[in-house]
């Protein structure tokens, strides 16, 4: 899969928005959306809120895991464990990228979140390199990739 396909899949994840408009239900091929009520939180697939945010029609709320304290805990756990630890979402990188690119004004400490996500990615890539090196150089029977997702 290339980056565009992965981003497309990530846009199917649900995100909470707070619309600044009211609108009855919208009937689409992929499913119905709405109704939208002014200032009432609503969950919908990620692709739709990005369009609304670009038109300044809503406020995007970051996922609960996109918090500095929670991300620091995830990063600390990843550093302590020898194998991969569970990530907050299967598409955490894509979701973070989309939110930071389109709604960084709705995320507190957006730059810190960006750094923590990058650190988590780097830590996981380092583990992958070490596991692959051990696999090749020590002629192991298998590489250790526990809890990759």
Image (cartoon, grey):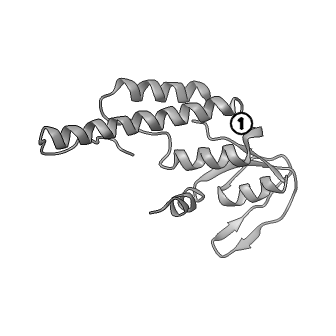
Q: Residue at the front extreme?
A: 137
Image point (51%, 49%), residue name: 91
Image point (63%, 29%), residue name: 112
Image point (86%, 50%), residue name: 20
Could you tell me which quadrant the N terminus lies in?
bottom left
Q: Is residue 26 left or right of residue 99?
A: right
In the image, residue 5 sits, relative to residue 107, either above or below, namely: below
Q: Residues within 10 Å of mark 1 (few under 14, many from 20)?
A: some
- The residue where tag 1 is placed is 107
Residue 61, x across and y down, in percent: 71, 42
95, 28: nearer the viewer = 95
Image point (55%, 28%), residue name: 70
In the image, residue 17 sits, relative to residue 74, either above or below, namely: below
Q: Is residue 66 left or right of residue 149?
A: right
Q: Secondary structure at mark 1?
A: loop
Place residue 109 in its image quadrant. top right
62, 83: nearer the viewer = 83
130, 148: nearer the viewer = 130
Q: Is residue 7 left or right of residue 106?
A: left
Residue 39, x across and y down, in percent: 84, 46
Q: Residue at the bottom extreme?
A: 29
Residue 104, x across and y down, in percent: 73, 40
124, 26: nearer the viewer = 124
Tell me how many marks there are. 1
């Amino acid at each position: 899969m290339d980056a565009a396909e992965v981003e497309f899949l990530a846009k199917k994840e649900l995100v909470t928005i707070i619309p600044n408009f009211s609108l009855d239900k919208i009937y689409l091929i992929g499913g119905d959306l709405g109704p939208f009520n002014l200032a009432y939180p609503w969950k919908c697939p990620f692709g739709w809120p990005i369009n609304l945010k670009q038109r300044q029609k809503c406020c995007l709320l970051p996922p609960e895991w996109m918090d500095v304290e929670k991300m620091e805990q995830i990063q600390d756990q990843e550093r302590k464990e020898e194998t991969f630890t569970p990530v907050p979402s299967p598409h955490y990188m894509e979701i973070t990228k989309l939110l930071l690119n389109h709604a960084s004004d709705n995320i507190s400490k957006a730059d810190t979140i960006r750094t923590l996500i990058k650190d988590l990615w780097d830590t996981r890539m380092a583990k992958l390199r070490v596991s692959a090196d051990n696999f090749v150089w020590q002629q192991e029977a298998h590489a250790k990739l526990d809890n990759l997702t």
